[in-house]
Amino acid sequence: MSVLLEVQSLSKKFGGLTALSDVSFQVPAGAIVGVMGANGAGKTTLFSLIAGNARPSSGDIRFEGRSIVGLSADRVCRLGVARTFQIVKPFPAMTVRENLRTAAMFGHAQQRSREAADAATQSVLHEVGLAADAERPASALTLSGQKRLEIARAVATGGRLLMLDEVMAGLTPTEVAQMLDTVRQLHAKRGLTLLVIEHVMRALMELCERIVVLHHGQLIAEGTPAEIGAHAQVHAVYFGGPA
Amino acid sequence: MARPGALWVGLALAGVAAVALLPLLGNEYLVGTGLTVLMWLALTPSWCVLSRLTGYVSLGHVVFYGLGAYLVVTTWQQWPLWLAIPAAGLLAAAFAGLVGGPALRVRGPYFVILTFGLAELVKFSIMAAESAMGMAARILFGAPDLLAVYWMMAALALASLLLLAWVSGSRFGHGLRSLRENEEAAETLGVPVTRYKLIAFVLSAAIPGMVGAVMALRSTYFVVGQVFDPMVSVTVIAMALLGGGDGVRGPILGVLFLALLSELLWAQAPLLYMILLGAILVVFVLLLPDGLIGLLQRWRRKGTAS
């Protein structure tokens, strides 16, 4: 499998605080890769650097073989990288459909007309389970609905790489199961490559082919879910056992 | 936005007819009043292109007006008007392009204060320059008559309304509304927010530059403090606020409402006008944040519901 995303020696310092330190890993095209780690491990920072919301202090990020470090977030999105936000950022006064319209018009898909954009996003609404809410303002959605809107908008950009930041956090067990289903179907049907941050460990273990584990900004383990489950340092970090 | 209904098309035609036929009455007072209304109709939609659609509320719209007026006054009898008026628009747009980069990095109340400060800064700089040149005021001899000014302003009002209508309904306008809702989300979804904000700022500046140029012909004298009067910026905001909505109907309603109110009350009871204006603004901000357009939509929904 070809490599879609490659992160090389990525570091990010906020003043004296090192949020990410020398992190390297690869995401093969079509894979689902999980990012695990406690609060403050640097997971969201990693997403922000890849998506262009923040600039790395050093290191390189290559998407489809080309360096995307230093590009603004909108250019990174147009190249085909889409992300969701852990703290949801809907366009509250717009309807769900209008929220998706922005993504289809301005993201990688670059739909020029409103009609073309709406036609393109109609199937996304169905796949993400928001079809019934299409004409409601985004502010009227439940938290679960707003998390789905985050995913729907990211998918509607038409990007190849979809980065999901804790889309299951705060959901009930039933909603988590539904969300897992949705994510799997999007992956299968649209041939997307997924990079997934998740606190719900079991969800991550079920979903991902590979997992990278961050701890205090450093990559401490990488492997299949089984390997990660058996990794001594991961155990030490998560369960306080001997390292 | 819904497609304009037959009623709106009819009203628009009636409006155009009124503007075209008013001078035929031969009443100078009426033409002067019409000119004032047209001036606000040119200024308010141009303000909306930036401030309504992006949420970057500018309290310095008058700076473009003043710059345009200043250009016409300083080039008077050296440049022909067909050159000076478009140049006034270009000057205002260029100024917006110059200051927009840094200014649009701050949001919310900071942007409001910044634009106000910027307008005052330009006002006092020009004031200082004029007094250094020994110019207390300038007088324009041989300016075009009221009717010519009226037609020029009618063209600018039309241009301003068309600009807002086009931007509001375009892909560009959807990008602006998205960044108004959440700038970081919009950027992450591919909207080139920095460029779009700057383009909106430049577009919103050109027309007031030309309006200032034309109004200088009307008053035929130039006093810096009057031309850069912050009340112009405030009135534009009040009109846009009273009108509401992202399209052209709101600004039109807001302009007509406030212009009529001021025409009825200003001459007879200026104090009462200011008190009433304050009260109306408070009522709208608290009870009708969507303006007259929001009120009309609410009535229509009630009408279809029952």
Image (tube, rainbow, N blue to C red):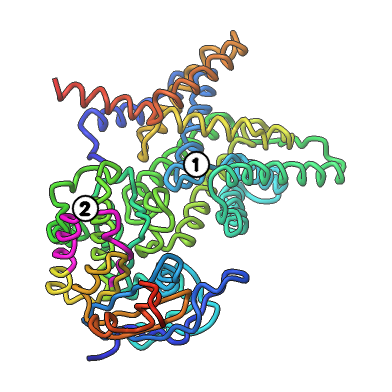
**Mark drawn on residue A104:** none
Q: Position of residue A136 (x, y in %)?
A: 22, 43
Q: Is residue A169 magenta?
A: yes
Chain to which mark 1 belongs: B
- In the image, residue A8 sits, relative to residue B96, either above or below, namely below
In terms of depth relative to the viewer, which is nearer, A171 or A193?
A171
Same chain, marks 2 and 1? no
Work out which quarter of the rendered image holds the N terminus of chain B and state it: top left
Work out which quarter of the rendered image holds the C terminus of chain B and state it: top left
**Mark drawn on residue B47:** 1
Which residue shows up at 27% across the image and 55% down it? A147
Chain to which mark 2 belongs: A
Q: Dot 2 surroundings within 10 Å: few (below 14), some, or many (20 or more)?
A: few
How many numbered markers are drawn? 2
In terms of depth relative to the viewer, which is nearer, B207 or A20?
A20
Q: Position of residue B197 (x, y in %)?
A: 48, 55
Which span is picked out in magenta?
A162-183
- Which residue is disc 2 drawn over? A172
Q: Quadrant of residue A196?
A: bottom left
Q: Relative to residue A138, is residue B282 drawn left or right?
A: right
Q: Is residue B235 magenta?
A: no
Whether residue B26 is visible, yes or no, is no
Whether residue B260 is visible, yes or no, is yes
Which residue shows up at 13% across the image and 68% down it? A185
Where disc 2 sits, the SS reads loop
